[in-house]
Amino acid sequence: MKIELRLYAQLRSYQPVGDNAPLYLIDVDPGTTIHNLLSKLDIPRHMAMIILINGTRARLNQQLKEGDCVAVFPPIAGG
């Protein structure tokens, strides 16, 4: 099944090589969770601070559905 994925800031380095678009489609298996998705993309858990599915905060064990839009934000610090 296909989902939309948006990676922000330094997480963009985990996008497929040559893909600089802010949004891209990715194939995942039915039953895939956020945790599975992060593992598939080799994104360390501590680097994915805020995860949204269709604009709503997601849990790591939340399963994805066809057409979901997943946004992943890194930790943000300011001073």
Image (cartoon, rainbow, N blue to C red):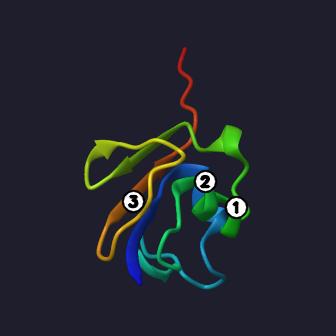
Badge 1: how crowded within 10 Å, few (<14), some, or many (20+)?
Answer: few
Residue type at mark 2: give it: His
Q: Quadrant of residue 41?
A: bottom right
Q: Which residue is mark 2?
A: 35
Badge 2: how crowded within 10 Å, few (<14), some, or many (20+)?
Answer: some
Q: Is residue 22 left or right of residue 14?
A: left
Q: CA distance from mark 2 to mark 1?
A: 6 Å
Where residue 14 sits in the image (x, y, percent)? 65, 66
Q: Is residue 25 left or right of residue 34?
A: left
Specify whether residue 23 is in view: no
Instruction: Check the image and name the residue furthest to the front.
Output: 31
Q: Nearer the viewer, residue 7 or 20?
A: 7
Q: Is residue 64 above or below residue 28?
A: above
Identify which residue is drawn at 52% across, 79% down. 28
Instruction: Check the image and name the residue furthest to the top.
Output: 79
Q: Which residue is mark 1?
A: 39
